[in-house]
Image: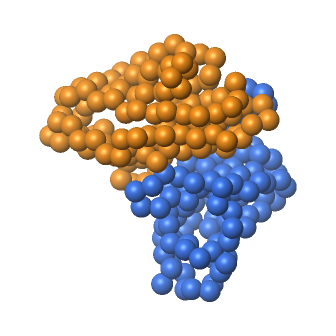
Chain colours: A orange, B blue
Amino acid sequence: AQKVTQAQTEISVVEKEDVTLDCVYETRDTTYYLFWYKQPPSGELVFLIRRNSFDEQNEISGRYSWNFQKSTSSFNFTITASQVVDSAVYFCALSEGGTGRRALTFGSGTRLQVQP
Amino acid sequence: DGGITQSPKYLFRKEGQNVTLSCEQNLNHDAMYWYRQDPGQGLRLIYYSQIVNDFQKGDIAEGYSVSREKKESFPLTVTSAQKNPTAFYLCASSRYRGDAGNTEAFFGQGTRLTVV
């Protein structure tokens, strides 16, 4: 069975600090997909990134970057120069390909508070 | 605009009553999902449907029922058998891409259900 672990329940930083959110996953499938979502106070989940298991290249999008390491089953998310608007709950999620479970399995989330 | 619409945003239910949460999408997505979120926790899968007239139980299906008669619609009924239904319910949809896995899921704004 698949599982996603986000060990950091809550992180508090001061604006302009860099922050890394950890995500560790478990799956028996060789084909799988990893995701990060942001949940602001409004409650709706906002998609940030999708990564497949065959693409281990790190990705950067503005102040956001993602580090995918199959050797440690991790898919960590870094926000550079954090801003107050980054305050939200962030979820890491996993889905499988082929005959595996297509629906997303979520971690428990990390609440990020960015103080001005 | 394309998207997912959940209604109502807030719902109050008396104990012992069934209640139906609406979810409609106009993204032409094949797959649809229902998740439950409790305070401070991640999202747990209730039911999902890859195609019309077919759906599968998720991790916490007991006390819930769904139907998928149309591609655009995936209503969730919370029955009186659900012992602790007070929670935030999120509906999502994604495109099915065969062996390439489902695309990222897009979420509705959620329905907050309270039992009174």
- Measuring from the top left, give residue B64's x and y in whole percent: 68, 68
Image x and y of residue B113, in percent = 51, 71
Q: Is residue B6 left or right of residue B66?
A: left
| Residue at 65% across, 80% down | B80
- Which residue of the protein is positioned furthest toward the top in this rendering? A57
Q: Residue at x 48, y 51 (%)?
A: B42
- Which picture quadrant has residue B44? bottom right
Which residue is located at x 69 percent, y 49 percent?
B32
Q: Is residue B84 visible?
A: yes
Residue B86 image offset from top left, x and y in percent? 50, 72
Give A39 or B46, whichever is nearer the viewer: B46
Observer-nearest of B32 and A10? A10
Which residue extends farthest left? A116
Give the residue displayed 54% in from the left and 34% down from the top: A25
- When the figure is inspected, residue B115 is found, relative to residue B63, above or below; the finding is below
Q: Is residue B86 above or below residue A94?
A: below
Q: Is residue B96 above or below residue A109?
A: above
Q: Quadrant of residue A93?
A: top right
Residue B65 left/right relative to B53: left
Quarter assignment of residue A60: top left
Judge from the rendering whether residue A37 lies leftward or rightward of residue A52; answer left or right. Answer: left
Image quadrant in which the N terminus of chain B is located: top right
